[in-house]
Amino acid sequence: MKKLKKWVPIYFFALLVFLAGCSASSEDKSGTMNDGAMDSAKSSSNEYDSISAGDKAAENKATTNYEKITVSNKMVIYQADLALRVKKFNQTLQSLEEKALKYGGYIAESNVTKEGKDQVSGSIKIRIPQKHFQGFLHEAEGQAAEVLQRTITGQDVTEEYVDLESRLKSKRVVEERLLTFMKGAAKTEDLLKISADLAAVQEEIETIEGKMKFLENQTSLSTVNITLYENKVVVPNIDKDKLNTWEKTKKQFMKSTNILLAGLSGLVVFLLGNLPILLTLTIIGFLSFLFYKIRKNKNRRE
């Protein structure tokens, strides 16, 4: 009995230690679970908040990607401006249109202007595949009697396109993450916020894709602006009356006849109008001549 009383305090102390240990273990597990839940929530929140930061980081890679591009991958927008003097305007214009179609291009714009009855000029804007750009220019210049102007420009848009491409990739990642968050959103407030952000991102994606398609179109098809002037000698119009010899002869004959008739008419008027004076002068002259003859004969006799 005495031995049992001796071990009771020891058993009681051991029981207290055991209970204390179980309590501490339970609290540790509970704390661990709470910390895990909080860490999970913070991780989700941090992931959503880090979308913009990740987006910007992806865009900053554009410069690095641009440096890796080779010369063959360059994107250049080519444009040529030609001014040509041609012998036959309509024939040359039709030939240029046919060559554009042959090379897989198309006529973007065309206009013709008439200057007077014989002078014609005009311009044509052609979009031609870049691989046929130089070949088409060579054939176009071959149509001219004289090349008045030739200007070729090139705009390198490779860096701009690479930047847009990087931005598009990052926006796609953001779009996917927002769609994932939208599926797991429990609160209406969170759903509305995510929907607004998703709409803004999708609008940016459409804008970027539009710019990329524009650059792709501009680089795949080169622009050729051609102004045509017809090299035509203008002969002044000659009056038909000047070309008709018979009519000209008749007019000259009538003119000379009229002059002759006018002269005769004037002479008749002069003679008839001055007939008294003329008769008097004639008589005086005749008498003077007669007197001179008589006097001369008389002198011979003497």
Image (spheres, helix red, strand yellow):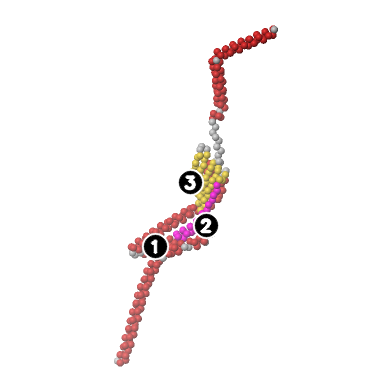
Label 1: element kind: helix
| Mark 1 surroundings within 10 Å by alpha-carbon count, few (fewer than 14), some (14 through 19), many (20 or more) | many
Magenta span has 165?
A: yes
Residue visible at 37% across and 72% down in the picture = 36
**Quick check: 39 left or right of 288?**
left
Q: Which residue is mark 1?
A: 178
On residue 254, the disc is none
Magenta span has 32?
A: no
Between 249 and 154, the residue placed more toward the observer is 249
Query: For the residues marked 3 and 1, what is the alpha-carbon distance in whole angstroms?
Result: 45 Å
The percent position of residue 191, horizontal first and vertical second, equals 35, 62
Instruction: Give whichever of discs 3 and 1 has the lower sequence position.
Output: 3
Q: Determine whether 88 is above or below 299 in the image.
A: below
Quadrant location, the C terminus? top right
Do tag 1 and tag 2 residues touch (Cβ < 8 Å)?
Answer: no
Q: Which residue is mark 3?
A: 109
Label 2: element kind: loop
Query: Which segment is the magenta one?
Result: 149-169
Between 277 and 70, the residue placed more toward the observer is 277
Instruction: Give whichever of discs 1 and 2 has the lower sequence position.
Output: 2
Can residue 215 be seen in this snapshot? yes
Judge depth for marks 3 and 1 and give the one in front.
Answer: 3
